[in-house]
Image (cartoon, rainbow, N blue to C red):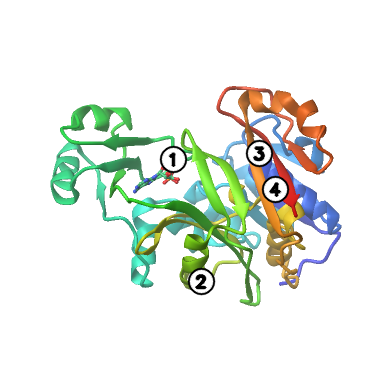
């Protein structure tokens, strides 16, 4: 299927990723129609249409599907029933397998292991008794994470020696969870790739990612040598995952760089915060290549545009410093149009460095 420019692309979710996807789509001559339960969001000002409705509203989903040529999404927790309904009416890219595997931690880790990759030791736990067994098996330190819906370090509890497992189980809300052994890593990085509708795969440089309070703080390319030395293995693994999933569009895999090589952490079947640097830092951004892929167009070059590129997230109050940021003529400021709240991703700044 090729969807020619002029057509309308449906996007589930109207946050900043939807906003940046819509901007890339507009540049290629497409219209976008956002579907989200909220009345408005960062994608409001940049999309032609906005349907405000829940993911369980079959009438609204059906009308939405009839108005677009392809559907994509900016988050992986699209409810299964909504996906099923949409799939029967319009191409949904990336497809069902990508969503099913990536929204559940144990299944993405299992896939990666089947493909020959390494993960932290892990066990799925569904009760306090299973958590006790898992801790006895994996040991501490360990991290208990909700298996679905976690983001930016939310839905996670670290367990050390003598940890109160009852309290930890309560803290994550007693929902399906994954206990992971603690990985001793040197740093973190991500593989951001895009698989076209014809199966062609391109990838960008693998950024080193530094986190602060569980939220991405900076992404930098080129990454240090410890990452570069293991990037090829990580890229090969992420490519195999994309192929196994029949993935179309951008796929992001996050890794720990350890002394013994890359350890897979998690994947997102979508554009990712650690790829925002590609807007100015690469010939074709992650957003543009995602749009090209889901529309069946050839993918653009992912070559870096400068010697070094650094992307810094603006969290909460950081965004109020926009005059200071703009005082540097080399800084490229992106604000998402949100009201400032502590811990909220408000925007980012990218710099191409000599
Ligand atoms: P996640 O939501 O899985 O991306 O986790 C958020 C952050 O917590 C990661 O980027 C790491 O810095 C840290 N983290 C997560 N899992 C582990 C682990 N198994 N071992 C060590 N650190 C971890």
Q: Given contact means CB atoms under 8 Å apart, are the residues at marks 1 and 2 in contact?
A: no
Q: Is residue 59 left or right of residue 33?
A: left
Are there few (<14), some (14-19), or many (20+) residues within 10 Å of tag 2? some
Residue mark closest to the camera, 4 vs 2 = 2
- N-term-proximal mark, 1 vs 2: 1
Residue at mark 3: 15
Locate residue 85: give its quadrant.
bottom right
Q: Given contact means CB atoms under 8 Å apart, are the residues at marks 4 and 2 in contact?
A: no
Give x and y (percent) for residue 200.
64, 76
- Determine whether the residue tagged by mark 2 lies in a helix, strand or loop: helix
Residue at mark 2: 232
- The disc at residue 150 is 1
- N-term-proximal mark, 4 vs 2: 4
Residue at mark 4: 64
- The disc at residue 68 is none
Identify the residue at image location x=86%, y=59%. 6
Q: Is residue 8 left or right of residue 272?
A: right
């Amino acid at each position: 299927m090729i969807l020619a420019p002029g057509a309308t692309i449906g996007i589930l979710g109207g946050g900043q990723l939807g906003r940046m996807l819509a901007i890339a789509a507009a540049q290629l001559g497409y219209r976008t129609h956002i579907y989200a339960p909220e009345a408005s969001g960062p994608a409001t000002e940049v999309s032609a249409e906005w349907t405000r409705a829940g993911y369980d509203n079959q009438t609204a989903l059906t009308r939405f599907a009839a108005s677009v040529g392809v559907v994509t999404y900016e988050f992986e927790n699209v409810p299964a029933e909504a996906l099923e309904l949409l799939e029967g009416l319009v191409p949904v890219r990336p497809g069902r397998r990508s969503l099913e595997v990536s929204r559940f931690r144990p299944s993405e880790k299992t896939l990666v292991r089947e493909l020959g990759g390494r993960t932290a030791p892990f066990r799925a736990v569904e009760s306090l008794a299973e958590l006790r067994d898992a801790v006895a098996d994996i040991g501490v330190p360990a991290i208990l994470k909700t298996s679905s819906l976690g983001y930016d370090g939310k839905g996670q509890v670290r367990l050390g020696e003598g940890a109160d497992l009852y309290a930890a189980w309560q803290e994550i809300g007693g929902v399906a969870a994954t206990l992971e052994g603690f990985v001793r890593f040197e740093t973190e990085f991500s593989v951001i790739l895009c698989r076209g509708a014809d199966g062609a795969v391109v990838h960008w440089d693998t950024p080193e990612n530094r986190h602060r309070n569980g939220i991405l703080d900076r992404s930098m390319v080129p990454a240090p040598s410890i990452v570069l030395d293991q990037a090829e293995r990580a890229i090969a693994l992420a490519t195999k995952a994309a192929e196994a999933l029949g993935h179309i569009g951008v796929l992001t895999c996050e890794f720990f760089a350890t002394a013994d090589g890359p350890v897979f952490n998690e994947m997102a079947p979508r554009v990712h915060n650690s790829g925002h640097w590609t807007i100015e830092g690469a010939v074709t951004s992650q957003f543009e290549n995602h749009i090209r892929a889901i529309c069946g167009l050839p993918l653009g070059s992912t070559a870096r545009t400068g010697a070094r590129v650094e992307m810094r997230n603006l969290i909460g109050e950081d965004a109020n410093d926009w005059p200071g940021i703009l005082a540097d003529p080399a800084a490229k400021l992106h604000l998402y149009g949100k009201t400032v709240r502590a811990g909220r991703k408000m925007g980012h700044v990218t710099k191409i460095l000599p």
